[in-house]
Amino acid sequence: MNPNTRTFRTAAVTAAIAALVLCFPLALLIVAGLLLHRWTGGRALSTMDFPDRLLTAAVATLPDRRRDWGVAMIAELAGIEGRRARWQFASSSAAAALWLAPIGRWPVLAPVTAVVVAGGVTAGWATGAAVPGLGVFAASFAGIIGVMVMLAIAYSRRVRMPAPVATLLLGGAVAAAVTMTVTFMVRQPTAAEHLSIFGGIFLAAVLAGGLWIAVAAPRTNRLAPYLGIGVALVYAAGYLTLLRAGYHPQLEPGTQQTMQLLAIMWLVSGSAIVFPLASFAAASAGRSFRSGVYVGVWAISTSAALAYAVFLYEALRRYTIRPGLLLDGEPGPVGQNLGNALFWVLGAIIVIGLPSALVGAGLGALTRGQKAHVVPDAAPRWAE
Amino acid sequence: MTRTRRPSPQTTAVVLALAHEPSTWRYGYELCRQLGLKPGSLYPILVRLADRGLLETAWDNDVPAGRPPRHLYRLTGAGRALATELAAAAAASPSSALKVRWQGA
């Protein structure tokens, strides 16, 4: 075959895969948006214009001790006429709503802020010195967790574990992901080339987000965390089995290739099928969109951390048995497995899983005719 | 030991505007327009004044049907005392940027 033709075909296949990777989540997001629009088309937002919605959403974030001030701003907006004036008042008030929470808390927040900044810088510097390439991740992880602590103080949020056992399991999954990242970087220092600044921040954001869900997620449905964890354990166990089978010495090379392909399919189609099914079931059984979303979020957070940790563990193990990349068995530097874990495992699960779970939860709620109670906490008291 | 901080020009303007007719309840949007302040600046000031016991608040339920009650504001006794101090200080320093605005309101 003409080398030019081969190059063209390779480029065409790559473009088709890239288009699929981009279009599929985009299509899911559009469907999720349409469902959310349909779902939120109930009474709560029907009479609101955009300035109203903007301000109501901002006020919903206020802690109880400041809620009256938010309601006061909404009441003032109700009397303002003219599109421009309403936008100006709503946008400025929404910004104010975000600053009202910390007022009066700065004696506590100021030293906490100093500790967060110092902690982030120190963590980044010390980790970067000990494990080259890991500084950005360490600084971002410490910084994001510090910001979460600051927000909890500013908003007077009492941290109450949603479900202790589920919290431990999700926390353990995050700890496993961090441990495997450090282990991988220590054993394979060249992997630093495959952990970009963006990759380090992305990894930190996903894992810190998982910790937040484990510790401070709303407690609306007691079973949601356990159902989500259960789905994640099945998902991760299935992925581990397929990964291991992909290079198992007792299997034929053809079978190994099939298993590698199945592992990739499990990663993508599992995200597009397993998570929305779990969300659909939860939303349908609980007659609640929120229940479906909570199950999906717990399942995706735990699955992402577990699958990422499993991938790195298996990548190291496989490389000692037979050099090659874990994802597709192709030759390549072992450090590239870290980049693959970030993009194909974490990225795929988050980008495909989240909108899929939203779609599942929306469909589950719609089948039972459940209507939204949008930002109920922000509803003005006069409306009750 | 408590530390006394000098109020910002915006806070001074709000306090003096409220002190112009101390017994009258005022609306937030009305104060915004009078002082040329954005709500993003005004409401944090009102919150701080209320937290320090300088401002009292109430709800105006006498509103047209379908409209929510509006929040009302006026100075407390301590707030009026502060206003007197600030007015004296403002008179002593004519360069105060916002002085003209509240006087002209």
Image (cartoon, coloured by chain):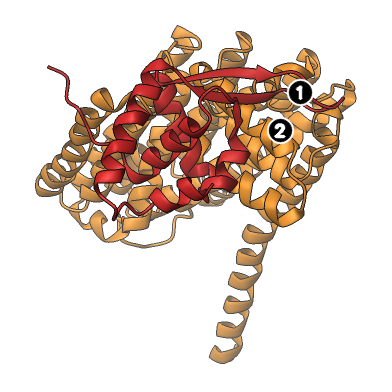
Q: Position of residue A50 (x, y in %)?
A: 73, 46
Residue pictured at 56% horizontal, 51% vertical: A254
Instruction: Give the SS element for disc 2.
Output: helix
Instruction: Give the SS element for disc 1.
Output: loop
Residue neighbourhood size for the residue with mark 1, other residues' Cα within 10 Å, grouped as few (<14), some (14–19), many (≥20): some
Q: Can residue A351 be seen in this view?
A: no
Residue neighbourhood size for the residue with mark 2, other residues' Cα within 10 Å, grouped as few (<14), some (14–19), many (≥20): many
Rendered position, A187 above or below A65: below
Q: Quadrant of the N terminus of chain B?
A: top left
According to the picture, the residue beneath numbered tag 2 turns out to be A276
Q: Position of residue A267 (x, y in %)?
A: 57, 42
Give the image quarter of residue A151.
top left
**Residue type at numbered disc 2:** Pro
Give the numbered dot on residue A210: none
| Foreground of the two, A171 or A110 | A110
As drawn, is B78 to the left or to the right of A65? left
| Foreground of the two, A153 or A269 | A153
Rendered position, A133 above or below A306: below
| Foreground of the two, A146 or A245 | A146
**Residue type at numbered disc 1:** His
Q: Can residue B4 be seen in this view?
A: yes
As drawn, is B79 to the left or to the right of A50? left
Give the image quarter of residue A317.
top left
Q: How many labels does the image show?
A: 2
According to the picture, the residue beneath numbered tag 1 turns out to be A373
Q: Where is residue A121 in the image (x, y as percent from the top left)?
A: 17, 44
Q: Position of residue A150 (x, y in %)?
A: 33, 29
As drawn, is B95 to the left or to the right of A382? left
Chain in red (letter) = B
Colour displayed for chain A in the image of the structure? orange
